[in-house]
Amino acid sequence: MLEIQRLREQSEQVKEGLKIRNYSDDQLGLVDRAIEADALRRKSQTQLDGLLSQVNSKSKDIGRLFKEGKQEEANQMRAEVGSMKQSIKSLEEQLRTAKEQLEELLLSIPNVPHPSVPPGNSEEDNEVFKAWSGDLPDLGPDALPHWELAEKYRVFDLKLGVKITGAGFPVFRSNGAKLQRALINFFLDEAAKAGYEEIVPPLMVNEATARATGQLPDKEGQMYHVTEDNLYLIPTAEVPVTNIHREDILDLSSLPIKLTGYTPCFRREAGSYGADVKGLNRVHQFDKIEIVQMTHPDRSYDTLDEMLDHVEGLLKKLELPYRILRLCGGDLTFASALTYDFEVYSAAQKKWLEVSSVSNFETFQSNRMKLRYRKEDGKTALAHTLNGSALALARIIAAIMENYQTSDGIVVPDVLRKYAGCDILN
């Protein structure tokens, strides 16, 4: 959530930033409406505080007048106080309405893109930040897509997932379970080496937690909602892990805070059809290791570079062809100021598959969750939050299966062999 002070002081800069997100004039009007609601809130608060002060003062005077035997004067003042209390009730209602309206407006305004975010309407306009420098693998005409390899080498079973749950819920078995476990352990060990504390969070969160990181009210349609308990299945470990420090005031010396978590992730992916959803390309449940940092505002873009290096290092160790994209304004998520996507090349499908997003949210999330740090002068300020996938397993498994396939089976990448306990899946 953007800070209201920023809207008041930098309204034109905020609007220019939102234009990068392709916001229309009507949508840009949200900024002006928020400023107006804030002005009404502040005016109502000032008037209310003034009346409360007068009532408090007059109440003391009434007591004094009664003690002095000046009943008529005291009763007259008591009538004035009664009238003022009616005005106070009206102002309290006006203030409550103004606060609710301001909150609703602020929740509907996305983050302002970083100046480096390129303009564009969709993923087709994303900028290639770092291209693959080598030749892309060519496995020849006999190469199989991962969904055909899955049946041949007993990796995962989509039909069984449909039987148990429904479409988009793969069942990993035998070689697939072994490969998945190897990847999880490898990614967590690499995160630990990089100084991240491992967290095992709940897989369901309440509304306040989902709202704090920007999933609500923006992504209700993508989340599984347990209506009876008003809980949400997490779309990523980012949600519960970042909320660990909601409403905290952090010591300056504790920054940066580095957390990692492995969880299943649940996404409805409503409206997904066609070839892009075949196999593991787009599923409703997948496993992922997430890295999260909370840091000083002056350091957050250095931190973003550090996290990019971490994810890139994982793909290098897996020896998978990859590229890095800088997302355009039209493809940027609601809460992000700057996002980089990592894609790996699927040799059998001859296409790029997204396996990670690494984002800086600046103060957008921390303002929602009141996550602050104490400065050297004793005052508090909002921290910056960042997160990244390190990595999402479903598409990584698809890429490994396709790129490492041979006539004898699927070769296990060198870095995973000590975790998998074998050199080839056959």
Image (cartoon, helix red, strand yellow):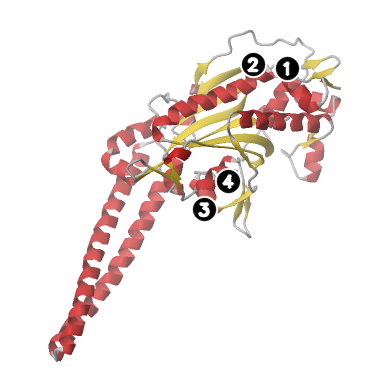
Q: What is the crowding at mark 1: few (fewer than 14 residues within 10 Å), some, or many (at least 20)? A: many
Depth order, front residue of 300/3: 300
Q: Which mark is residue 321?
A: 2
CA distance for labels 2 and 1: 9 Å
**Dot 2: what SS?**
loop
Instruction: Give the quadrant of residue 23.
Output: top left
Tell me where residue 125 appears, x and y as whole percent: 48, 22
Instruction: Give the quadrant of residue 356.
Output: top right
Residue 277 visible in this rendered orientation of the protein:
no
**Dot 1: what SS?**
helix
1 or 4: tag closer to the N-terminus = 4
Is the C-beta separation of discs 2 and 1 under 8 Å? yes
Is the C-beta separation of discs 1 and 4 under 8 Å? no
Q: Which residue is mark 1?
A: 403
CA distance for labels 3 and 1: 42 Å
Q: Which mark is residue 208?
A: 3
**Dot 4: what SS?**
helix
* 390 shown above or below 98: above
2 or 4: tag closer to the N-terminus = 4
Side (left or right) of 78 relative to 302: left
3 or 2: tag closer to the N-terminus = 3
Seen at 53% across and 46% down, the residue is 243
Q: Which residue is mark 4?
A: 240
Seen at 28% across and 66% down, the residue is 91
**Residue type of the residue flagged with mark 3:** Ala
3 or 1: tag closer to the N-terminus = 3
| Count of numbered circles on the image | 4
Residue 47 visible in this rendered orientation of the protein:
yes
**Which label lies toward us, 1 or 4?**
4
CA distance for labels 1 and 4: 34 Å
